[in-house]
Amino acid sequence: MDPSVRIVRLATLKGVVEQHREHVAIDLYLLRGLSDQADLLFRIHAAELRQTQDFLLDLKSSHFGRHLKTVGVMHGLTKKPNYVPGFPDQMKLDLKTTSEPGQKPYAIVIPIRKTAEWWGLDQEKRAAMMQEHTAATLPYLASVKRKLYHSSGLDDLDFITYFETSKLEDFHSLVLSLQKLEEFRYTRRFGTPTILGTMKSLDEVVELLAQ
């Protein structure tokens, strides 16, 4: 496509994002060069799922959106921690560790599905394993920011795990630590896909796609 035409069509991306800013928070990530699955990732937060749907419908019908092919969608919601209230006081204090200052340019998304045996365990057994899980994450709280989304019933997943970091070696060590735990044996799906990208502003995405 002629660069001038591409720029005009990319302007419609900015227009749709700005139109929906009041109701949805939209983060963009560049996957091109790091992933063979997609070029862009949109992470969208909204108070109501239909607000996300409205944004995506407007995006797909825009002049820019007509050139987009959706390769995957994952739905999840945020909840208050299920297990943290029962953790020891020192662990609760450790969980308040703040992230290291500076930009965390890398984002990793890993979908997870647990086995039926996991959901059949009693609450105390799961809580004990999640306390062990949490203890393994403590050394990495400062360098790896994370967020958990609950997907059971909304998607063919149980959880979507989202991470930001500037130190991929720390993230690698974190995952290895978690895979050694008893709780991991109840994991039926880990990744597939695992998504790796870099965080970009809307203007940066427009500039890169205009080249």
Image (cartoon, rainbow, N blue to C red):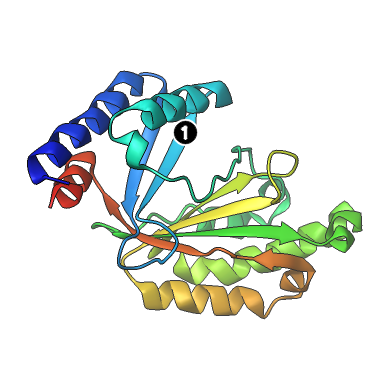
- The amino acid sitting under disc 1 is His
Vertical order, 159 against 172 (above or below): above
Vertical order, 108 against 57 (above or below): below
Q: Residue at x 35, y 55 (%)?
A: 39
Q: Residue at x 48, y 52 (%)?
A: 96
Q: In the depicted view, which residue is nearer to us: 42 or 7? A: 7
Q: Residue at x 82, y 62 (%)?
A: 115
Left or right side of 116 for 92: left
For label 1, the crowd category at 10 Å Cα-Cα, with few meaning under 14, some 14 to 19 and many 20 or more, is some
SS type, badge 1: strand
Give how far across and how far down residue 91 sits, in percent.
60, 59
Q: Which residue is mark 1?
A: 45
| Residue lying furthest front | 1
Q: In the depicted view, which residue is nearer to us: 75 or 138? A: 75
Q: In the depicted view, which residue is nearer to us: 34 or 113? A: 34
Left or right side of 167 for 103: left
Give how far across and how far down residue 50 sits, in percent.
55, 22
